[in-house]
Amino acid sequence: MIDETAYPTKVVDVLKKVARNEEELEGLLYQFDERAAIREFDGGQSREEAEKAALTEVFSRHQNHLK
């Protein structure tokens, strides 16, 4: 079960639009968390910048996977 309150509303809204089911949404949110953390802690980006970049990456990767 996903705790949607643990994520920014915009992130959940965007990923819900592309996820085919709850399980896929959970996977996309996990990827988002992982990518944002790497950018913030290893890459030195602010959390806001890291989240924007992570959402773009996860969304784009998912869209390419569906092609």
Image (cartoon, rainbow, N blue to C red):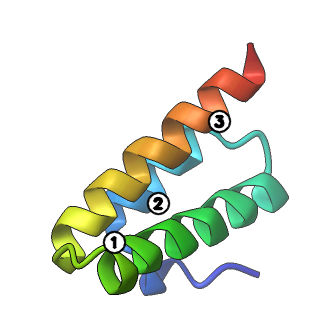
For image coordinates 65% across by 23% down, the residue present is: 64
Local secondary structure at mark 2: helix
Frontmost of labels 2 and 3 is 3
Q: Are the two marked residues, 2 and 3, in contact with CB atoms closer than 8 angstroms? A: no
Q: Which mark is residue 12?
A: 2
Tell which of 4 and 54 is nearer to you: 54
Q: Residue at x 52, y 77 (%)?
A: 4
Quadrant containing the C terminus in the rendered view: top right
Question: Which residue is disc 3 drawn over?
Answer: 62
Q: Give the mark nearest the N terminus, 2 or 3.
A: 2
Q: CA distance from mark 1 to mark 2?
A: 7 Å
- Estimate the spatial distance between the alpha carbons at disc 3 and disc 1, rounded to whole Å: 19 Å
**Residue picked out by circle 1:** 8
- Write down the quadrant of residue 52 in the picture: bottom left
Q: Is residue 26 left or right of residue 53?
A: right
Dividing the picture into quarters, in which one does residue 45 lie? bottom left
Residue depth check, mark 3 versus mark 1: number of the one nearer the observer: 3
